[in-house]
Amino acid sequence: MPGNSNEKGNMKFGVNRSGASQFVLAFVCAALPLCAAAGLQLDYKLSAPQQPGTVWRSPKALTFAQSPAPPGVTAPMTLAALTDLALRNNPATREVWQAANAQAAALGMAEAEYYPMLDLNVALARSKSSSGSTTSTAAQTRLSPSVSLSYVLFDFGARAANKQSASYSLLAANLNQNRTLQAVVLRVEQTYYQLLAARQTVVAGEQTLKNVQISADVANARRKAGLATIGDVYQANTLLAQSRLALRRAQGEADKFKGALCNAVGLPVETPLPLAEAQLPAQEVRLTVEEYLSKAKQTRPDLGAAEAQARAALAGAQATAAQGRPTLSLAASGGRTFNNFDSEKFGNGSNNASIGLNFSVPLFDGFKTTHSVKLAEAQAAQLDATRERVAQQVELDVWNAYFDLDTAQAAIESAHAYLRSAKQAREVAHARYQAGVGNIPELMTAQANEANARMEVIQAEMGWYASLSQLNFAIGVFSSDLENK
């Protein structure tokens, strides 16, 4: 009847429209990531340089991803504040953090093997058959939804070995992150002490320039009074020019270390970076080298990471060996087939279900598993040797850093004694020259010795703190941890 024909047409149109809408929606969802990635594609054609020795030039200016805006620095920064800022702002900390997150995801993938796999399948088919030029059957549309489940019951330890390997890999990633944080702290502390030394060198240079200027004024006055020769004035002016040049170089070094400190904390090098008055730790070593060596074996993150990587490789070798062993799994499925999906006989269909066990035994794969096991075992042995090498390097690092710090302590005492003597010698030489007893070479030598002594004191003191930071890094602790021990 006409009414029934319209009914069928409406039903058919409704099914097709719904399917088309779902298809369009699925296509749009799948295309969204591609559209997002299109912004990363080059919109111009590239070619190689025309001939050797020719500079390649881009048709358009290259654009780079914008880094996050750095935090502003207004208040004077202490070393602790700089360290905290570096740990939050230095890109190296985010890099290793994301590496640890990636290993955590890998562990989740290994743990997923313990869960059953559940899949939904939907098949839609339309068929029509004919036996001759005139005889044909009506077209049929079949809808066949089904659910399938698979679960590995026993695999001779393959899943456990994979999980163990992923767990040790995550442990290694976490420990490597800690080592990177310590490296960031070391760089901040070393650069901070270098900047302090450079600024103290500027102050010492200004004092030296002031003393040399006084001597030059005395030489000019004595020259006018006929008590000195023009040679004395020339020599005094030469030393004055050298002092100005040394001061300018010291100022340039201070500017360089200021930029290096900004870079260490993750700030643009041109960022103004005021420093608070330095609160430096006491200059003392509280433990023996044997105690520090024992402590480093417990606290060095890279030593623990090397151990974890060796164990991860061993577990990986076990997982590879398990791939050549039998597996027992459960498989189940159920579904229904709807015939004449687009007609009034929609309910006409049949059900199907199955459940069973699958026992798989690898027989021969061209010795692929055998060689894979050998490869995994060789890599595990290599990482075990790496662990021993790291352990030896840890001992050497602590040994060298400890005696560098011990030497720096002795250098401080010698440098202060040197400065006291040089200052007294300069004062005596200046008084002698002013009284007409001494000569200008004697005064210039005394002033140069005092300037060198000031530099020795600065380098010795800042070198001690730099050596302390290096010892902290060699042991595998932060400065605050070592100071509290």
Image: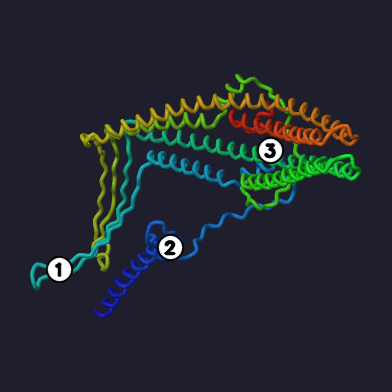
Q: Is residue 94 left or right of residue 368?
A: right
Spatial distance from mark 3 to mark 1, Cα to Cα?
91 Å
Residue tagged by mark 1?
137
Report if residue 206 is visible in the image: no
Residue tagged by mark 2?
42
**Quarter-of-image position of residue 194:** top right
Mark 1 or 2: the one toward you: 2
**Residue type at tag 3:** Tyr
**Residue type at tag 1:** Thr
Query: Relative to 48, is 353 above or below?
Result: above
In terms of secondary structure, where does tag 1 sit? loop
Residue at horizontal 69%, vertical 29%?
483
Q: Which one is nearer the viewer's eye here, 189 or 346?
A: 189
Residue at horizontal 43%, vertical 60%?
56
**Quarter-of-image position of residue 283:** top right
Task: Report the quarter where the C terminus lies.
Answer: top right
